Image (cartoon, helix red, strand yellow):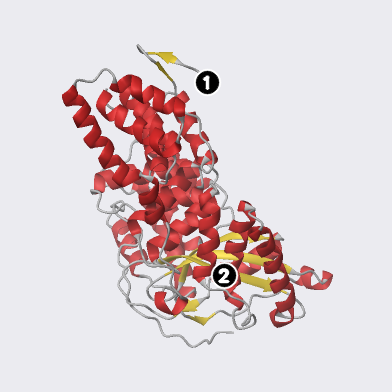
Amino acid sequence: MKRIFFGIFMSLAGAALPVEANFDKAMQDYTAGNFTEAYRSFDALAAIGDYSSAFNIGVMYYRGEHVEPDPLEAWAWMQLAASQSGEESMAATASKIRARFTPEQQEAAQRRYDALLHSHGKERVMKDLNPVLLADEECEVDRTPIAKNPPRYPPVELQRGRFGRVVLEYSVMPGGHVRDITVVQSNEPSFTRAAAKSALSYRYEPAPVSEPTIGVKTAVIFSIRGPVNNERELVAELNEWKGKAESGDAVAQYIYAYRLGVFRSFRKYMKSTDLEYQTANKWYLEAAQQGIPQAQFEIGRNMVVGRGCEADVKNGMKWISAAAVAGIPEAQNYLATSAGSLSEEDRREHAIRWLKNAAVNGHYFSGLLLAWELVSGPGPATDEELSMAQELVEAKPVDYFDEVRILETRAAVAAAQTDFKSAQRLQKRAIKLAGRLEWDLRDAKHRQEAYQRGEKWSGPYFYDIELEPLPLQASIH
């Protein structure tokens, strides 16, 4: 390990499990001299009990990297790391720093250490990050589907007699229609297209909420025999992953938990199988504690919304932040769209920073959101922002099937470039498509009116989201 002499020998700590993947990304930023990002990452990881990251925060305070030099703060973080990890090298470094303090400084440093122990000690971290599990009937976070008509079986796959499975994730709007459909798993492109096209017509019971319900998962099965006859295969698959999960395999724990959530689509066919959210959460937590970033994201998101557990936004966001540090695009996207009480200026900076990370990792939806943020600010976009936004909207969609949002984002970019003729044309196509899908058109029409006045759009994408149920005739299948 590289050591730097500062009157004492000091080096950054190396990560031990359970957050090795997350830690590696933080160290990459540090060694590249990107101290702001490194500090943010170490701080996020220290919040979930990674004491190598806590020690490295101490090092940064000692060296004055991103923060002002503060030996007392440095000692407190190093002592926290040493006391909670039992690492003798950390304790030795902390002792050398403390030996230089005056009695008054020692007292002040001890008070800061006590405060950190209270907020970041093992007992507190375990208490905070373990969700209070609840049965499904105690949560009531599921939106109730009204119409989920089966997709058309691709003729070529039907002719071949091939089985297909597609896992979709999307948002449900207050009025009940589905937006931002993303395919997260599929065994064949033809099944992908068929399942996603079908999902555009899904309808859920309207709900008196002010934001979309995000992260809704559905599995679409293509089987000539029909889904009922596949119950044995589905149960056998679950049991195989469960066995691997029970053996301590962290990846299997995550996959088993994810499968439980996906297979909730078939509850009426799998009544003897425990598909409760709280059961999935138990395994997500096991995998998250072993350092699987995808599991950290899932358990964090469930904690934020209270899915299978008591809602706990503050501590759920700690798990999501750790997953974002590890480079999980979905977690980065979630942070970008979860600004909390930030001012509009800070919210945009926060969103753009995380969306750039996600877009670089190849997440198409994040690139689309980034293009929107770049051109929808209160002032005119810079030439660099316009160029980046144009490049993003010209990219080919990957596993994303909300053509209305794609068209509206392209229209917003055109308007920001003062090409209002193109903006109106693209917006008209979006309105026509949304009308065919019987989606709420208020947002789209607001934007078209702005373009007709020769104004670019400034503000969020979901601008007018009050509940306005549409008449529904179909029934669920």
Q: Position of residue 453 (x, y in %)?
A: 27, 57
Q: Residue at x 69, y 63 (%)?
A: 243
The quarter holding residue 100 reads top left
Q: Residue furthest right?
A: 160
In the rendered image, is residue 389 in sight?
no
Q: Residue at x 39, y 36 (%)?
A: 83
Q: What is the number of the mark on residue 1?
A: 1
Q: Is residue 434 above or below residue 204?
A: above
Assign a secondary structure to mark 1.
Answer: loop
Q: Residue at x 79, y 69 (%)?
A: 162
Q: Position of residue 292 (x, y in %)?
A: 55, 49
Q: According to the image, label 2 marks what residue?
A: 218
Of the residues shown, which amino acid type is indicated by label 1?
A: Met
**Taking 75 as reference, is 273 left or right?**
right
Label 2 crowd bin: few (<14), some (14–19), many (20+), radius 10 Å: some
Q: Residue at x 43, y 51 (%)?
A: 319
- The answer to whether marks 1 and 2 mark residues whose Cβ atoms lie closer than 8 Å is no
**Taking 255 as reference, is 408 left or right?**
left
Q: Position of residue 271 (x, y in %)?
A: 61, 82
In the rendered image, is residue 352 in sight?
yes
**Spatial separation of the CA atoms under disc 1 and disc 2:** 47 Å
- In this view, the mark in front (1 or 2): 1
**Taking 186 as reference, is 52 left or right?**
left
**Which residue is nearer to you in this view: 196 or 312?**
312
